[in-house]
Image: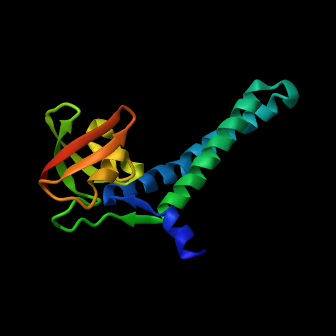
Amino acid sequence: MNPAAQDEKVTFVTKDGLKQLIDELANLKNVRRREVAKRLAEAISYGDLSENSEYEEAKNEQAFLEARIIELDEKVKYAKIITHKKGKVVELGSDVTIKRIKPRESETETYTIVGSTEADPLSHRISNESPIGEALLDHKVGDEVEAQVPAGKVVYKILKLK
């Protein structure tokens, strides 16, 4: 595989995030696969597959399960653990406190910049690929950054970085 294609597959995660991916993958492979196979065997035992809705549901569930296993295998295979160096600029793993200054001022908020697989805005974990996360990267305390979000252009000031 060429390096550019490999770079596109990189999944940035924290140590905890990687553990969660591995745990989910193990559960899908070792528990859910057996459950779905059992449902499938049971549905087949009912006979005529052409009019067997249980069989169709089990086949669909199996297809979704296998697709998720493939997706998680890829994420784990190309996982790159975020190592945060206490730098002076926003990077993956940084906790950054910001305040929206345009179009109207807001309260301060603190976010952790994470890879897309761990993003959870409700828990103040934003992806480095999100409009705000991407805008904050490589900036330092005191900088004003502009982000294009669905609601329009917003400007944030970086107040604190740790």
Which residue is depicted at the point 31% across and 45% down? 147
Closest to the observer, 106 or 85: 106
Colour scheme of the picture:
rainbow
Q: Is residue 43 left or right of residue 71?
A: right
Number of marks: 0
Which residue is depicted at the point 81% across and 28% down? 46
Q: Residue 107's image quarter?
A: top left
Residue 39 visible in the displayed image: no
Closest to the observer, 138 or 94: 138
Closest to the observer, 38 or 78: 78
Q: For the N terminus, which image quadrant?
A: bottom right
Q: Is residue 24 above or below residue 6?
A: above
Q: Position of residue 144 (x, y in %)?
A: 19, 49
Residue 57 visible in the displayed image: yes
Q: Position of residue 69 (x, y in %)?
A: 58, 52
Q: Position of residue 79 (x, y in %)?
A: 44, 64
Q: Is residue 57 left or right of residue 7?
A: right
Q: Is residue 106 above or below residue 120?
A: above
The outermost residue toward the bottom is 2
Which residue is depicted at the point 58% across and 75% down? 2
Q: Is residue 64 left or right of residue 112?
A: right
Q: For the C terminus, which image quadrant?
A: bottom left
Which residue is depicted at the point 36% across and 38% down? 149
Q: Position of residue 128 (x, y in %)?
A: 35, 53
Closest to the observer, 112 or 90: 90
Q: Is residue 91 above or below residue 121?
A: below
